[in-house]
């Protein structure tokens, strides 16, 4: 249950990050600069932690590991996050939220191509993983596009937006005034963000095998990503006033997203990828939608719809099916390994028995040989005495 609990914690942290990013965007913060600050805060937090906790267990840092860290920082940090925020500007939050739920399907296909997962449709576990993945994607689509009657869970009288949401233009209204070319470009950027995040999960699985230090690998990824994101943000935004952080929601969003989501959450993700594989991690992605919807209803005074509730139920059922299939698959692998270990243990036992028998015969022969020589020496000594 530790990987399951860890991934639920990760999705809760991602949901809180979405709330903070929404508040920072309402405050007028450039989201590309937010991505750069996020990775810089992550580097400042996780590098000292990695140097202290893994100073004796860290393997040798090679050029291959550095190149893998560069790719992880590129796909998991700079590329996926900047493509996500650019797609959010050019399209709408609804479309970007829907496209991010394609991550389990894209990861599943990539994992099969890189031989990290097996498409065993002949077994119940393989069918459960496939059906659960499809149900998760379908539930996310129902959650996003099917509306129906709206209602509130309960009134908490808390609205963190404080009326800014009503004054700001809604994504659907602003997107209607954009050109068709810009909207199509935003669609491709959203798809690119999804593919980039799925590629990061595959690369993280490869890197975890070669460099199994979760804090150090996260630190390398954060440093590489922060350098890349700062260079990109400087090329996009030349206004230095946008880089100023005060004691406000901008600083809180940058610090939280860097320390929690790009720091500790990535450590948990890399550990879960090493334990259960990239598909196991990606299937929890639609769970973030459910958490965001509940948090938005409680904290941002947003209403839930019937479609969101039905989609959330389908997401949870699909998630349970994938977890069941993965657990059955892990049990099958353990049984196969135990069956292979039993003949090997028996062979080792037989060889050790034969070795003990041969050693006993050798010891017996060596203990008998001196008696023969001793008797011979005694006879010779007796003959010498009698002759004298």
Image (cartoon, rainbow, N blue to C red):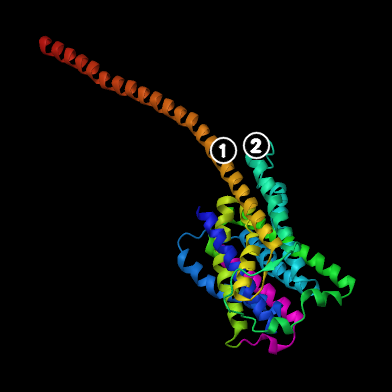
Residue drawn at (53%, 36%), measured in percent from left and top? 335
In terms of secondary structure, where does tag 1 sit?
Answer: helix
Residue drawn at (54%, 63%), measured in percent from left and top? 9
Callout 2 crowding tier (Cα within 10 Å): few <14, some 14–19, many ≥20:
few
Judge whether 367 appears above or below 120 on screen.
above
Asked if the residue under mark 2 is in contact with the one under mark 1, i.e. CB atoms within 8 Å, the reply is yes
Q: Which mark is residue 123?
A: 2
How many numbered marks appear? 2
Question: Closest to the observer: 388 or 154?
Answer: 154
* In this rendering, the label closer to the viewer, 1 or 2: 2
| Magenta residues (range) | 217-245
Q: How far is disc 1 from disc 2 in space, using C-alphas?
A: 11 Å
Question: Closest to the observer: 97 or 149?
Answer: 149
Judge whether 301 appears above or below 346 on screen.
below
Query: Is residue 380 rendered to the left or right of residue 339?
Result: left
Residue drawn at (18%, 13%), measured in percent from left and top? 380
Picture coordinates of residue 73, whole percent (x, y): 66, 66
Q: Is residue 232 magenta?
A: yes
């Amino acid at each position: 249950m530790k990987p399951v609990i860890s991934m639920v914690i990760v999705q809760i942290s991602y949901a809180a990050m979405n709330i903070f990013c929404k508040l920072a965007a309402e405050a007028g913060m450039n989201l590309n600069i937010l991505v750069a600050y996020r990775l810089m805060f992550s580097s400042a937090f996780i590098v000292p932690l990695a140097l202290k906790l893994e100073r004796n267990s860290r393997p040798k840092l090679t050029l291959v590991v550095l190149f893998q860290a560069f790719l992880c920082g590129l796909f998991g940090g700079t590329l996926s996050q900047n493509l996500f925020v650019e797609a959010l500007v050019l399209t709408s939050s609804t479309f970007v939220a829907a496209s991010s739920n394609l991550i389990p399907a894209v990861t599943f296909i990539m994992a099969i191509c890189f031989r990290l997962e097996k498409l065993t449709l002949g077994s119940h576990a393989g069918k459960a993983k496939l059906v659960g993945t499809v149900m998760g994607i379908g539930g996310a689509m129902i959650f996003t596009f099917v509306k129906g009657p709206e209602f509130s869970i309960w009134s908490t009288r808390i609205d963190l937006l404080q009326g800014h949401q009503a004054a700001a233009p809604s994504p659907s209204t602003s997107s209607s005034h954009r050109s068709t070319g810009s909207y199509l470009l935003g669609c491709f950027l959203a798809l690119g963000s999804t593919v980039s995040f799925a590629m990061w999960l595959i690369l993280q699985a490869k890197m975890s095998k070669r460099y199994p230090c979760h804090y150090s690998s996260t630190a390398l990824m954060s440093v590489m990503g922060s350098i890349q994101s700062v260079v990109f943000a400087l090329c996009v935004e030349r206004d230095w006033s946008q880089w100023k952080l005060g004691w406000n929601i901008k600083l809180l969003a940058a610090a939280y997203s860097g320390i929690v989501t790009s720091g500790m959450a990535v450590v948990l993700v890399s550990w879960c990828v090493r334990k259960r594989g990239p598909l196991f991690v990606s299937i929890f992605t639609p769970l973030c939608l459910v958490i965001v919807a509940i948090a938005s209803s409680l904290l941002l005074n947003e209403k839930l719809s019937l479609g969101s509730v039905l989609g959330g139920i389908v997401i949870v059922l699909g998630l349970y099916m994938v977890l069941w299939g993965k657990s059955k698959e892990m049990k099958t692998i353990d049984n196969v390994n135990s069956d292979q270990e039993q003949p090997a243990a028996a062979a080792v036992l037989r060889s050790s028995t034969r070795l003990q028998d041969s050693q006993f015969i050798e010891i017996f022969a060596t203990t008998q040989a001196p008696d023969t020589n001793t008797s011979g020496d005694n006879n010779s000594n007796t003959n010498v005495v009698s002759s004298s």
